[in-house]
Amino acid sequence: MKSRALNDTSFLVVFADEEVIASLTSFVNENGIAFGAFTAVGSVSRGTLAWWDAETRAIVQEEFSHQFEVASFSGNITAGTGTTPPGPRVHAHTVLANGALLRAGHVLAAYAYPQLELVLTTPSALGIKRRKDPATNLWLMDL
């Protein structure tokens, strides 16, 4: 991954076969970023998506292994109010497309191919964090 930054905006390029969430998490940790928002364009070739099933109150995961254009990729970075989740957390959602074949959900892992271009804005003065919601057992944003 390569990056360039100006003020509170960073432009990152995740290259072929690099895992996007791990690369972004590493960048966030190395640069002391506690809050941010991002969007991306590009394509991916494999990974794992997930979604929360309200009926079972559990996270469902699905792996994919197919070349997809990234039709939508957005998310945020927040820190927890306690010790879990530790440190800044990357929370990303995507819609992936290959013709009529679509996949969507929370991004647990996605491998760029040939690359993913990401714009990250980090207005640190907001200082927004997450707290564990007892009703859903999920870490939700706490304004």
Image: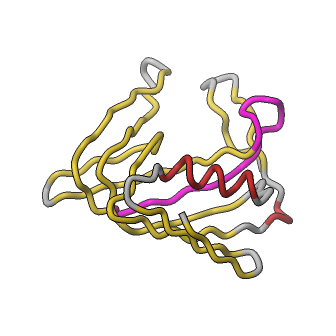
- Of residue 119 and residue 130, the one placed in the foreground of this image is 119
- Of residue 101 and residue 64, the one placed in the foreground of this image is 64
Rendered image quadrant of residue 123: bottom right
The residue depicted at 34 percent of the width and 47 percent of the height is: 104
- Of residue 133 and residue 112, the one placed in the foreground of this image is 112
Is residue 47 rendered magenta in the image?
A: no
Q: Spot the residue most to the top.
A: 56
Percent position of residue 29, x then y:
73, 51
Q: What segment carries the magenta color?
A: 70-87
Q: Is residue 29 above or below residue 51?
A: below
Is residue 73 rendered magenta in the image?
A: yes
- Of residue 115 and residue 138, the one placed in the foreground of this image is 115
Q: Spot the residue most to the bottom.
A: 6
Rendered image quadrant of residue 36: bottom right
Q: Is residue 68 left or right of residue 58?
A: left
The residue depicted at 28 percent of the width and 47 percent of the height is: 103
Percent position of residue 112, x then y:
38, 57
The residue depicted at 50 percent of the width and 69 percent of the height is: 13
The residue depicted at 46 percent of the width and 31 percent of the height is: 52
From the image, give the main secondary structure of the stretch colored magenta.
Answer: strand
